[in-house]
Amino acid sequence: MRDFNSNSVFLFIAAGIIVVFVIAQSVFFLRKAWIRARELGIEASVLRRVVRGSAAFTVAPAIAIILGVITLSKFLGLPLPWLRLSVLGALTYELPAATSTAATLGVSISEGVTDPRVYSTIAWVMTLGILSGLIIVTLFLKKIQGGIQSLKKRDTKWGEIVLTALFMGMISAFLGMIFADVTIGLKGWIPVFVMLISSLIMLICGFFVRVLKVKWMEDYALPISMLGAMALSIPITRLLG
């Protein structure tokens, strides 16, 4: 069987059509918002300042997304990660979904996918998993928010506890993957050390933001911690792996 090419022209065209459609949709609503703002009497200079400020603040999360695309592109090719992380996917979901599926199929993420069945399985898991969020938000978000607000009105302390518990539950799902291989020796501790380094870098960024009042770093703390941890993961892997 001929090897599957995860960087084929067809996949680039298919992903490109969807991405262009989303960009066109964004431009359409930006134009509608601009026209409506002018109708409300907002000065054009104010709108231009808002646009420039919003554009500048999109750079920070975009850096983190680009890192995710680069990380996944080595394994899945460029079109699928580009599509996923440009339209619907979240970096905190796409990477675990792809790596956990690959591990279940017994495929190493250090090598590119050449089996179309493996590629399609990973793509389906990534797609179907993220759809649950859209369905829940569309059908139940209003009810969930109403329940949380009602709980906070009755008991503010318990409302904060519930929100914290939900957040910690989400974090625990990712921590399980990090500590999954610690029993195999020092090699299994590599993700743990990388996580600790990333946390340390984030704490340093927090010190600059909170204590030294370097406000611009607040939006760049995530990509800085990711880049730093990824860079330091190389010597850690060579040392322990």
Image: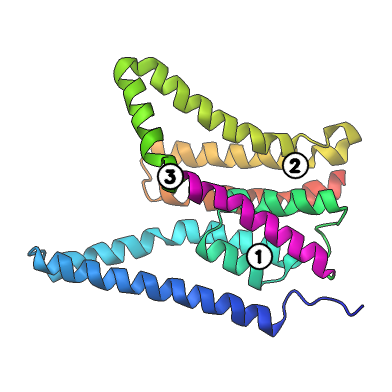
- Between the residue at mark 1 and the residue at mark 2, the CA separation in whole angstroms equals 18 Å
Front label number (3 vs 2): 3
Q: Which amino acid type is marked by label 2?
A: Pro
For marks 1 and 3, the one nearer the N-term is: 1
Image quadrant assignment for residue 107 = bottom right
**What residue sits right under mark 2 in the picture?**
191
Q: Residues within 10 Å of mark 2 (few under 14, many from 20)?
A: many
**What residue sits right under mark 3 in the picture?**
139
Q: How many marks?
A: 3
Q: Residue at the location (55% across, 59% down)?
A: 65
Left or right, residue 3 beside residue 197: right
x and y percentages locating residue 144 in the rendered image:
41, 34
Q: Are marks 3 and 2 in contact (CB under 8 Å)?
A: no
Residue segment shown in magenta: 115-136
**What residue sits right under mark 1 in the picture?**
70
Task: Determine the secondary structure under disc 1.
Answer: helix
User: Residue furthest toward the bottom?
Assistant: 9
Q: Which amino acid type is marked by label 3?
A: Leu
Left or right, residue 104 beside residue 44: right
Task: Determine the secondary structure under disc 3.
Answer: helix
- Between the residue at mark 3 and the residue at mark 2, the CA separation in whole angstroms equals 37 Å
Residue 23 counted in the magenta span: no
For marks 3 and 2, the one nearer the N-term is: 3
In the picture, the quarter occupied by the N terminus is bottom right
Image quadrant assignment for residue 77 = bottom right
Indicate which disc residue 236 carries.
none
Residue 118 counted in the magenta span: yes
What predominant SS class does the magenta segment belong to?
A: helix
